[in-house]
Amino acid sequence: MWTGISALWNPPGLRRELRFERDLQMSSRLRQLLRSAKRTPFGWRFVSNLEPTMGYLFGNADKLSPRDQQIVRDLNAYGVASISFDDLDTEIEFSALEAEVEQLVANSGAEIDKLKEADASIGKKTFNLEMLGSEIAFDPTSIFSRFALSRSFVNIANAYFKMKTRLRYYNVWYTAATTSNARESQLWHFDREDRLILKVFVYLRDVDTGSGPFTYAPRTHKKGELRSISPDHFNEGGVQRTTDDQMANVLPRENWQICTGKKGTVIFADTRGFHKGGEARTSDRLMFTCMYTSPASESRKLIRFPEMVDAGQMRRSQRSALGIV
């Protein structure tokens, strides 16, 4: 009798529905736990990036030169490092890169003039022109793609991450001097594409304090002693920004690394740490930049690849940086 009454109150269809709901809740909790685990250093490396980590640790990674090793040591300790172009193994003559860029500038006169006349609306980043376009069409023969995939850059990125990294972006930036208030990337911020993010900046003209030098808060990257600092900030277009005064309250100005430099200066920085740049006041800035992340990064796809890439002449590390097996 009790069995019959129980069946009336708990029919098979209801039991199946309850089991389905319970399984769904468990699945949701498991997904949440997995997402949380992936955000930990261990999960990021050995769950999200297991294969590229093992490939680097147990593969035949290229040997770093003594100068490249010093760059990696500085990145590990401070999150930022600089060196002269001539001291790197880029496989490209600086004069060839410079000539190609100056031709770009000559051909972009109208766009540069428009840049200088543009308004200061938030979200437009009108002080900065991406001279290769906002989405790069990858060309393996281009001097810019070859530069971004040069031996020193890829080797340093892989050694810093301790995994096989991915090239996510490269471009030439023309930054126009402006009298507008500092905004967007001219203010302190940190990037969020990944746990570690390596960007390279190559000055193609001399950069002094009036040219908007890249400026970094040392040791605020994930490997640094100051990774937990939390300066006051404000919301600008959905992004947290920090003024100089707000940053100075947690890290004195004398501790900031202001990366002025001659033409040919190369800066490596983990932009997961606090940084800013491009606040050019007295002269324009011209530089090449590229970015490397882990393969698991959810970075926006800023390089458009053709259906077939001729990788026959590429080294294994270069193919890996492009995600080509």
Image (tube, rainbow, N blue to C red):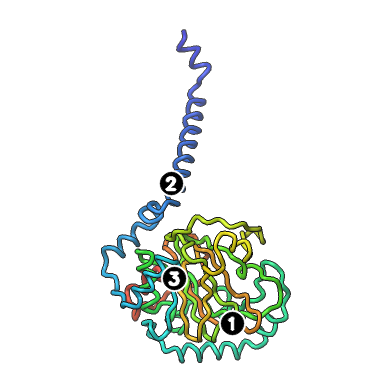
Q: Which residue appears at 49% of the width and 36% of the height?
A: 25
Q: Position of residue 30 (x, y in %)?
A: 44, 41
Report, in whole angstroms, how far the alpha carbon at label 1 lies from the one at label 2.
43 Å
What crowding class fits label 2: few (fewer than 14 Cα within 10 Å), some (14-19), or many (20 or more)?
A: few
Residue 5 appears in view: yes
Compare residues 261 and 40 and report the one nearer the observer: 261
- Assign a secondary structure to mark 3: strand
Q: Nearer the viewer, residue 321 or 282?
A: 282
Residue farthest to the top? 1
What is the C-alpha distance between the residues marked 3 and 1? 24 Å
Of mark 2 and mark 3, the one earlier in the sequence is 2
Q: Nearer the viewer, mark 3 or mark 1?
A: 1
Asked if the residue at tag 2 contacts the one at tag 1, i.e. Cβ–Cβ closer than 8 Å, the answer is: no
What percent of the width, then of the height, locates residue 296?
43, 59
Give left or right: position of 135 versus 325.
Answer: right
Q: Is residue 27 above or below residue 57?
A: above
Mark 3 crowdedness (10 Å alpha carbons): few <14, some 14-19, many ≥20: many
Q: Residue at x 44, y 66 (%)?
A: 78
Judging by the rendered image, the residue that carries numbered circle 2 is: 34
| Residue ID at (42%, 60%) | 223
Residue position marked by numbered label 1 in the rendering: 285
Residue placed under numbered mark 3 in the picture = 167
